[in-house]
Amino acid sequence: MTRNVFRLPDLGEGLTEAEIVDWKVAVGDTVEIDQIVVEVETAKAAVEVPVPYAGTVLSLHAPAGTVLSVGEPLIEVGPADGPADGAGDAEDPAAARYREEERAGSGNVLIGYGTGHARTGRRRRGGSRPAPAPADPTPAGRDPRPAPAPAERTPGVPHAPRVISPLVRRIAQDHGLDLAAVSPTGPRGVILRRDVERAIADRATASVGGGAEAASGAAETMARTAETVAGTAATAPGASESAPLRTERIPLRGVRRAVADKLSRSRTEIPDATTWVDADATGLLAVKDALRRDRPELGIGLLALLARICVAGLRRFPELNSSVDTERAEIVRHGHVNLGFAAQTDRGLVVPVVRDAHLMTTAQLAAELTRLTGLARAGTLPPAALTGGTFTLNNYGVFGVDGSAPIINHPEAALLGVGRIVDRPWVVDGAVVPRKVTQLSFTFDHRVCDGGAAGGFLRFVADCVENPAVLLAHV
């Protein structure tokens, strides 16, 4: 086996660099193929990276906190016991298969270098023992029979699905997905990450009518989280007014830097304008409560209803579901609605994207919003779920604020903000009565439309909030 330098792999989704968060190994450790050696943080997610080689760690090329570009050296692995009968001279087949998946062009390749099926050419982990002879006992729990090569398939005989990426296997396991039921699109029947994500999405769409009792609505969950955070901050040690202040320098990295770059670009490139209106949300809350009471299995909350209203509004005002191509001096009106929604997590603000929201029912929107919110808070959102949005919904009312002039999520052209819903005096049929009122704010790119379209969209949203029956004429 030769000395192998493993470089930071192509992270997909246009990502070109990552920050080293934590090394899982040290110089001198013995590693095997597919072993997680480092955790890195990109602008979109925290990722555990496995190594495509087996042997002894000779060098870690950068300490934790270092930002590396794709292709820079990450870790160097050498022979564990020196060359053994030339078995390690050839290139690791797992590493070759990794490059095969990247060449397949999945677009979502983050990690994945070995396979759990082909183990005949790898060393056993743990110290400097020589390679076991055929008579050696088999480790507990390991099948003593050699695993068949992935290419050896007998027609009519069941075989294990061919999965190269350990991340793909982990995503499938986390979602309880049977890989044997997944249709592969990779070369020679390799199951790629996009295949698993498509299968998960298809299953969620098919089962949206049941098993969603836990989906109490992303907006309500965010509200409870905000209240918990606020209470914790008020009682946290060191929160006293007498606590001394100190100057800190916090590196602008990872998600925080990505957010800063995107917002700065938005403010620099987009001539935005904001308009707002107060709306009586009593009717919308009544619909939400009725659905929760009569059809709790659907899990439809406030955010899902607002998402449905936004999709209907974009159908009516398609110029707002667009972006500006500055290089070609064109306005691009999208033929689909990929609805982003702001979600606050421990790693900062992220905007997961509900793809093809215009094709979903309200119940399907509720299920997808709940799923993506859970993944965002767990830090396991795939980068593909954070890109490609065409419009953003921001329910900042969960933080207890009434209004905002939000910054457009570049390169989109518009963003709807929803403030808190509170009791306020409201005139109904000539009488002042208490009603549930919210402030809706709408920020738009003035290049794609004028105030007429923006005002029309916002008024349509307000009308639907005040009288949800209006939606029936537009769905």
Image (tube, grey):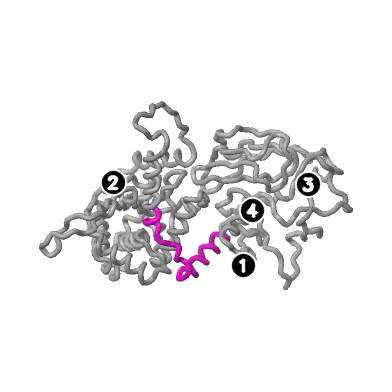
Mark 4, secondary structure of its residue: loop
Q: Amino acid at mark 4?
A: Ser
Mark 3, secondary structure of its residue: loop
* Pointer 4 residue: 165
In the rendered structure, the answer to whether residue 276 lies left or right of residue 310 reads left
Marks 3 and 4 sit apart, C-alpha to C-alpha, by 19 Å
Q: Judge whether residue 72 is colored magenta.
A: no
Magenta-colored segment: predominant secondary structure = helix
Mark 1, secondary structure of its residue: helix
- Closest to the observer: 27 or 109? 27
Q: Amino acid at mark 3?
A: Arg
Q: Quadrant of residue 461?
A: bottom left
Q: Going 55% across and 52% down the picture, which residue do you hit?
A: 107
Mark 2, secondary structure of its residue: loop
Q: Earlier in the sequence, mark 1 or mark 2?
A: 1
- Give the crowd class for mark 1: few <14, some 14-19, many >=20 residues within 10 Å: few
Q: Quadrant of residue 285?
A: bottom left
Q: Is residue 459 visible?
A: no
